[in-house]
């Protein structure tokens, strides 16, 4: 029942942040509506150091930020200023267009920090790609405990629970597995995957170490921890159809991405009012067809 196993590729985003990028992958662009998955860290920052991802734009998606350790300070063009702590969710719906930055607060930077978390992008359904931008911060997430596996539902519907601001059928959950524990994935979602954020698991007899994602085909699917604890992100849902990705822009229509590029180049997308001193310029078009690396 395993369709493919994907290993994260290390990417330096600048601003002190290096990530392991899992999606998009050449042979598997999406899992359900999830079009992008970055593992931020784990990384240690000495006193005086931190993250400075400068303001940059998005269209056609929702960013979902979830931390295991550390802290980020979110600014966006709606005027939002919101720190995120472990176990919380920042859900930013870009829709027709939003600009945001992610930084380390001065108070945190002074003492240093350890950062470990996940940022996912969820492609919006075609009829909602031009929805007004929005931001939601969620601190109370539903949880469950089953046979040595504790889980937190970040978004969607899963294990009889509902959470988040999802705009299409999906699930996104954080699992902590005790040594030797097992977990059966639900089969009520068309596409399903498991990303190992710590430790390792096995699936259908295949070892899946940290930094790899296993994508399951139809039918029963189960993961099992070895003799050590494991941390796994489960994600998937119904497909929203193919998407074009260029830099930070996602759309079902290539002409919409062209328009977003023109808007950012011309300064027609406003910067966050609380972080307007700098921004990431539009990158050049790639020399060959294909998306540039998102940020």
Image (spheres, grey):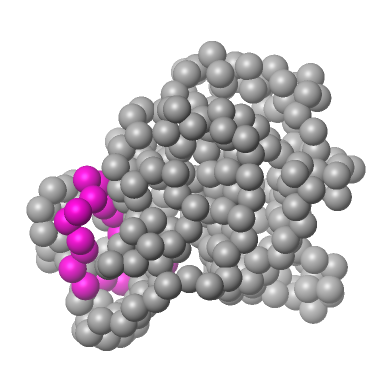
Quadrant, the C terminus: top right
Quarter of the rendering containing residue 229: bottom left
Which residue corresponds to the image point at 34% horizontal and 78% vertical from the top-left?
144
Which residue corresponds to the image point at 60% horizontal and 20% vertical from the top-left?
285
Residue 279 lies, in percent from the top left, at: 79, 38
Above or below, 136 relative to 224? above
State whether residue 279 appears in this view: yes
Residue 274 lies, in percent from the top left, at: 86, 50
**Magenta region: which residues?**
183-201
Say whether residue 214 is left or right of residue 20: left
Is most of the magenta stretch helix, strand or loop?
strand
| 128 drawn magenta | no
Above or below, 16 relative to 144? above
| 194 drawn magenta | yes
Which residue corresponds to the image point at 73% horizontal and 25% vertical from the top-left?
264
Residue 2 lies, in percent from the top left, at: 16, 52
């Amino acid at each position: 029942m395993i369709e493919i196993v994907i290993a994260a590729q290390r990417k330096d985003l600048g601003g002190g942040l290096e990530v392991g990028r899992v999606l998009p992958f050449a042979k598997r662009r999406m899992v359900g509506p999830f079009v992008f998955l970055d593992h931020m860290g784990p990384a240690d920052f000495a006193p005086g150091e931190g993250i400075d991802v400068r303001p940059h734009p998005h269209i056609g998606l929702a960013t979902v930020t979830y931390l295991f350790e550390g802290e980020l300070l979110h600014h966006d063009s709606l005027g939002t200023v919101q720190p995120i702590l472990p176990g919380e969710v920042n859900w930013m719906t870009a829709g027709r267009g939003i600009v945001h930055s992610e930084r380390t607060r001065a108070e945190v930077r002074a003492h240093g920090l350890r950062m470990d978390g996940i940022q996912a992008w969820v492609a919006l359904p075609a009829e909602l790609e031009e929805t007004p931008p929005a931001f939601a911060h969620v601190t109370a997430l539903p949880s469950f405990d089953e046979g040595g596996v504790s889980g937190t539902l970040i978004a969607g519907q899963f294990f009889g629970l509902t959470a988040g601001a999802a705009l299409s059928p999906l699930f996104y959950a954080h699992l902590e597995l005790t040594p030797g524990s097992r977990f059966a994935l639900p089969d009520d979602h068309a596409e399903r995957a498991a990303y190992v954020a710590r430790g390792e698991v096995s699936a259908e007899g295949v070892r899946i170490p940290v930094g790899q994602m296993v994508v399951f085909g139809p039918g029963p699917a189960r993961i099992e921890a070895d003799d050590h604890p494991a941390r796994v992100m489960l994600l998937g849902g119904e497909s929203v159809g193919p998407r074009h990705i260029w830099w930070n822009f996602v759309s079902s229509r290539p002409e919409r991405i062209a328009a977003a590029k023109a808007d950012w180049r011309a300064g027609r997308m406003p910067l966050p009012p609380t972080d307007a001193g700098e921004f990431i310029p539009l990158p050049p078009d790639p020399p060959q067809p294909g998306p540039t690396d998102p940020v």
